[in-house]
Amino acid sequence: MSRSTELQLAEEILELKKKRGAVILAHYYQIPPIQDVADHVGDSLALAMKATELDADVIVVAGVQFMAETAKVLNPRKRVLIPYAGAGCTLADDCPADEFEAFVRQHPGHAVVTYVNSSLGVKALSDVTCTSANAVKVVSTFDEKTPIVFAPDRNLGAYVAMKSGRDIVTWNAVCEVHNAYSLERVSELLEEHPGAKLAAHPECPMDVLKIADFVGSTSGILNYVVESKDKEFVVATEPGVLYQIGKRAPGKRLFPVLTGEPPRGECRFMKLATLEHVRNCLRDMAPEVQVDEDLARRAAAPIRRMMEIGR
């Protein structure tokens, strides 16, 4: 897409936002042109919290389906739109609610903590949800003798268990993006860039996390790199965040962990939406997110508890 076309679409989006009384929430993993037209750019926790503070009639969630559904649960009387309705999440798909319910029943007496990368049905079965930004803090709110069921990401669950020292049983699923960041590839990049610091997302494999200089959420990695006195970083998270780091700290050298040929390491679902999709959803007021009222009511409590705990 040419720069002139991007600018024209951005102007149309700004006009439509005013006309519709809308705001755009964009995840860090969205393409840069969408981040640029967004009113707020953030990680899952930040966007969930922001969604409850908005005075707008219409919320456009530039992200994946579970994010848009979360925004709708928190704002049942507002219209919530998603630019690309087919933007799913294999991590959420790999934890079906009926199978997870059976799994929970197999572990009586366990508190149930679920990552926000999950369906509303799974959230509704939970005591509290979490994001990578506050997972350790969320788990630590339970009595230390209480065992935990953690779903759906086994890598994040293993990291939380290591950091908290808690007895955690994890569901067996992984993020297809972060799990692809192998120790072999990370080590190659560190050898190619001696002196570079390694910042990793906790959904990465444990052998990568054990050698990282910093482990944290997307926003945590962004703040770490921006505030650090170091100049070079191997970044083991979805490379969409590199755009925001570059805007805030243009002097830093960033090396994303991409693997294979063609390179893998980007979220294919986050990258489905384009500026045209954002323009079209504001123009047509569709696709609009709808959720089952009873399911939304049951999912709302664990989501709100997560937000009360905060970062």
Image (cartoon, rainbow, N blue to C red):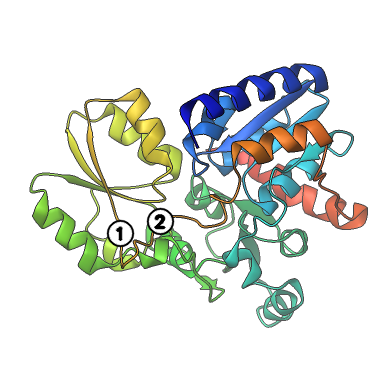
**Above or below, 301 relative to 55:** below
Q: Nearer the viewer, residue 310 or 274?
A: 274
In this rendering, the answer to whether 290 lies above or below 184 is: above
In the rendering, at what x and y percent does residue 34 appear? 56, 34
How packed mark 2 is, by other alpha carbons closer than 10 Å (few <14, some 14-19, many 20 or more), is many
Which residue matches tag 2? 202
Amino acid of disc 1: Leu
Which label sits on residue 72? none
* Residue in the image at 70% along x and 73% along y: 96
Q: Position of residue 142 (x, y in %)?
A: 59, 55
Q: Amino acid at mark 2?
A: Pro
Find residue 249 and report its image quarter. Answer: top left
Label 1 close to label 2 by CB (< 8 Å): yes
Q: Is residue 308 visible?
A: no
Q: Is residue 22 visible?
A: yes
Q: Where does the image place residue 154, in percent across and percent down from the top left? A: 48, 69
Question: Residue 267: horizontal and vertical position, in percent?
Answer: 49, 56
Residue placed at 33% from the left, 30% from the top?
Answer: 246
Q: Nearer the viewer, residue 277 or 208?
A: 277
**SS of the residue under disc 2:** loop
Quadrant in the rendering for residue 48: top right
At numbered mark 1, what does the secondary structure look like: helix, strand or loop? helix
First of labels 1, 2 by sequence position: 2
Task: Count every numbered label the image shows and give the total.
Answer: 2
Sort mark 1 into few (<14), some (14-19) or many (20+) by Cα contacts within 10 Å: many
Toward the viewer: 136 or 28? 28
Horizontally, residue 192 falls left or right of residue 45, namely left
Please name the residue that numbered disc 1 is placed on.
209
Q: Is residue 209 left or right of residue 241?
A: left
Residue drawn 59% across and 66% down?
90
What is the distance, in whole Å, between disc 1 and disc 2 at their CAs?
7 Å
